[in-house]
Amino acid sequence: MYDRTYMEGTRGTMAVDWEERIDTKRLRTERKERALEQLQSNGLEAALFVSDPNIRYVTGLAMTGGSGADHYTLLFEDGQVVHWDTADHASNQRFNCPWLDDIRYACPGLGNVPRASGHDGARRFLIETMADTVVSAMEEYGYDGATLGVDVGNTRLLDALERRGPTTDVKSCTSAMEVARRVKTRDEIECLRQVAAICEAGFQRIVDEASPGKTEAELWGEAVRELWRHGAMVQGGYLTSGPNTWPKHQANTTDRLIRPGDLLYADFYNIGFLGYRSCYYRTFSMGSPTDSQQDAYKLAVDDLYDVLDRIKPGVTTDEVVEGFPDADGEHMDYYDADEYWQMTTNHWAHGLGLQLYEVPLIWRGLSSDYPIELEEGMTMAVETQRPADRQGVRVEEMVVVREDGVELLSQWPIDELTVIDH
């Protein structure tokens, strides 16, 4: 395991002048530099970003998802940026984001607006006008005729752009951004440390508030309130109890009454801090767990740490994946499954960053046949589960790949089931 240096770890969420915390200016600068380096190495003179995480990566704008592609960003190889957004957003960004010099009003050619228009002519107008705005900006900045990377493969948008002159390249653009984002900067890692700490405040709220007779929804509401209180953006997650814990997606948070002897499963996924997403699970016992539940929990933790012990720079994912349970451990007979690819999300590790699933992915459904190499500075979540007494346990750690092993970003005790007295 990675041994942290003095004072390395989560500090406060507020800005102060008396110690260095997350340096947001450095965060924006280093991300943009990495994106430019990869775009240039892929021979791209300009890139159009429609994907929210890519837009945030190069601009620092708080793209919160669900927008319907009504904003887009153009990045040139000399570092200049043109950003288009909806009227209210664009006007606010001009005031609040002085590091961006050119913010314009968007024409949403993709997503919710054309879908809701109900008219093919309207959709043509929107996509053609969007393409006009992009190509006109390229001409203004002296990039007419340049190769244009695009991070979405929408054929209508690509056709509209190419009819106006640019040669588009989706593959090089998506590959460049994947490489730029796969290894995290120190400020990105600190954002993930911070969101892990906020999740732990949510776990503590569950311990403090859980009691027989409360519903899953009541308890989840208390946890979510705690997450928001600490500055997180809650865009996912749920809490289940008793028989709803196995299989894990049998139900999302419901109005089921929590009872003595229940296991509780808290799934804090897609909780964001400065855009960086958590995936952090813990299991709790309402009263003393049974022997079967304790045995299942120990198996899940042993599985998890077998994987963590294999993670180092230079190791390939086909080596790491052997730490995950085999077909018996996956309980494939329960699911009536005979191929690992049928067991998506049950036992795997996935990258964390501005999206919940980033490079790398370590999973028996893919990694044995399509391995990739792990790099220092990658961040990921590693998750395992086991059934017990018609209920289930699930555990997960958030980690950074370090030279001498993994650094645990998650700190909630994992050696034993957390028992909630009542």
Image: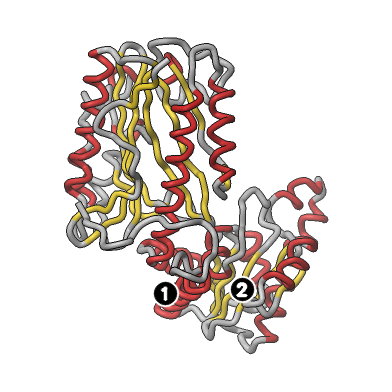
**Sequence-first tag of 1 and 2:** 1
Residue 143 falls left or right of residue 338: right
User: What's under tag 2, amino acid-wise?
Assistant: Leu
Alpha-carbon neighbours of circle 2 within 10 Å: few (<14), some, or many (≥20)? many
According to the picture, the residue beneath numbered tag 2 turns out to be 74
Residue 407 falls left or right of residue 174: left
User: What residue do we see at 61% from left, 57% from top?
Assistant: 63
Q: Quadrant of the C terminus?
A: top left
Residue 293 x %, y %:
28, 17
Residue 54 x %, y %:
53, 63
**Closest to the observer: 338 or 325?**
325
Element assignment for label 1: helix
- Which corner quadrant of the image does residue 359 belong to? bottom left
Residue 290 x %, y %:
28, 12
Q: Which mark is residue 64?
A: none
Residue 62 x %, y %:
61, 59
User: What residue do we see at 58% from left, 23% from top?
Assistant: 218
User: What residue do we see at 82% from left, 55% from top?
Assistant: 121
Q: Which mark is residue 38?
A: 1
User: What residue do we see at 55% from left, 67% from top?
Assistant: 150
Residue 54 in sight: yes
**Closest to the observer: 325 or 143?**
325
Q: Are marks 1 and 2 in contact (CB under 8 Å)?
A: no
Q: How far apart, in angstroms, are the residues tagged by discs 1 and 2?
A: 15 Å
Residue 24 to residue 101: above or below: above
